[in-house]
Image (cartoon, rainbow, N blue to C red):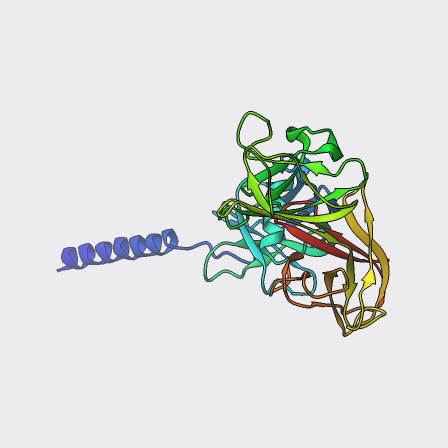
């Protein structure tokens, strides 16, 4: 019996030791809150341009969060308009220790956020650090960046408008475009010289393809003479290849609305700048009102924004609200056939 008891005691002791050893082996590392990620950026103010779309515009760099042990941490760069508290942030998963945006890539992101091209906007950025569902998420410091996006102008099917006003060169001529790709084209051309009012439409930027001239009575003809506007000025040119018709309407643009000095009764005239190819002027605008653009102090041709506003104009579009009173540099750009836009820049 003594021998049996001794064996039982020894076995129990070994079992207790093994159990203790197992409990020690099962001791888990409990992750605490990670250290705060430190975020930096290579720029604080950026004016984007289509000419530099392929260049690196900004690089975000961060130091990883430390949880006290080697861990698989997920990092997300968050970008939102300042003041939103990241409620509608654009979240981008990042690997490595940086995120680089080209000018074009950043511009696409900003326009998708509803920012208006040509208008500076303040953004806030931070990095979110996540380990697991039961571990508290940490965030980096917040950086504020001022960025001005540009208009990402689409390429529409077009007709070229070579003429005496530019040396009869199709390759460098203005264009009229068909945004709907329905063979109905329009665009604006400035004729500043009374001796240079003749032109033609060409299907390509050369003379070797289809050329359209005047068939008489507003009709286009591939064997006709030169088309012609009646006087100098800024003309809306149209061409319809479905019925082979064309037209030219002289325009003088202005801004109108209860935010403008003349209210809704009359337009405040803008001046055409042939160098920059825009209509512009400094206009005092009042808060709480709205405005639109129109031609010839009439409503036949009027341009408003979209809903929600994106800075791109359309015929008969929405009124453009003004929330802050002051003098504004008003710019109307009709130089890109079929794609028109504006800018209200407070002085």
Residue 67 visible (yes or no): no
Q: Quadrant of residue 323?
A: bottom right
Residue 177 on image: x %, y %: 58, 44
Q: Does 30 appear above or below 214? A: below
344 sits to left or right of 201:
right
Residue 305 on image: x %, y %: 65, 62
Q: Residue at x 53, y 42 (%)?
A: 95
342 sits to left or right of 101:
right
Residues 177 and 65: in front is: 177
Q: Quadrant of the C terminus?
A: bottom right
Q: Does 259 appear above or below 197? A: below
Q: How many marks?
A: 0
Residues 105 and 311: in front is: 311
154 sits to left or right of 242:
right
275 sits to left or right of 131:
right
Q: Residue furthest left?
A: 1
Q: Does 200 appear above or below 24? A: above
Q: Residue furthest front?
A: 216
Q: Quadrant of the N terminus?
A: bottom left
Residue 332 on image: x %, y %: 74, 53
Residues 347 and 136: in front is: 347
Q: Residue at x 31, y 54 (%)?
A: 17
Q: Residue at x 68, y 53 (%)?
A: 341
Residues 229 and 259: in front is: 229
Residue 38 on image: x %, y %: 66, 49
Q: Residue furthest top?
A: 208
């Amino acid at each position: 019996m003594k021998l049996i008891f001794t064996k039982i005691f020894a076995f129990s002791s070994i079992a207790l030791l093994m159990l203790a050893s197992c409990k020690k082996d099962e001791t888990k590392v409990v992750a605490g809150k990670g250290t705060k990620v430190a975020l930096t950026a290579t720029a604080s103010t950026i004016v984007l341009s289509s000419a530099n779309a392929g260049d690196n515009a900004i690089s975000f760099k961060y130091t990883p969060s430390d949880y006290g042990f080697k861990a698989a941490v997920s990092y997300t760069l968050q970008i939102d308009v300042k003041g939103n508290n990241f409620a509608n942030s654009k979240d981008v998963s990042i690997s490595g220790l940086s995120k680089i945006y080209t000018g074009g890539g950043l511009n696409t992101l900003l326009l998708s956020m509803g920012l208006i091209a040509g208008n500076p906007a303040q953004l806030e950025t931070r990095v979110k650090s996540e380990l697991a569902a039961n571990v508290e998420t940490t965030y980096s410091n917040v950086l504020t960046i001022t960025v001005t996006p540009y208009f990402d102008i689409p390429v529409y099917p077009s007709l070229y408008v070579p003429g005496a006003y530019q040396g009869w060169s199709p390759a460098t001529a203005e264009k009229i475009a068909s945004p709907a790709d329905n063979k109905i084209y329009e665009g604006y051309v400035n004729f500043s010289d009374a001796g240079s009012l003749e032109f033609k439409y060409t299907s390509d930027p050369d003379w070797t393809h289809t050329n359209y001239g005047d068939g008489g009575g507003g009709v286009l003809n591939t064997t006709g003479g030169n088309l012609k506007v009646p006087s100098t000025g800024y003309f809306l040119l149209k061409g319809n290849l479905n019925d082979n018709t064309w037209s030219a309407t002289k325009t003088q643009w202005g801004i109108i609305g209860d935010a403008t000095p003349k209210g809704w009764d009359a337009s405040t005239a803008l001046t055409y700048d042939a160098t920059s190819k825009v209509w512009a002027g400094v206009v005092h605008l009042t808060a709480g009102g709205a405005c639109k653009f129109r031609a010839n102090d009439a409503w036949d041709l009027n341009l408003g924004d979209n809903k929600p506003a994106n800075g791109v104009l359309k015929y008969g579009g929405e009124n453009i609200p003004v929330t802050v009173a002051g003098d504004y540099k008003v710019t109307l750009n009709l130089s890109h056939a079929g794609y028109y836009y504006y800018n209200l820049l407070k002085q």
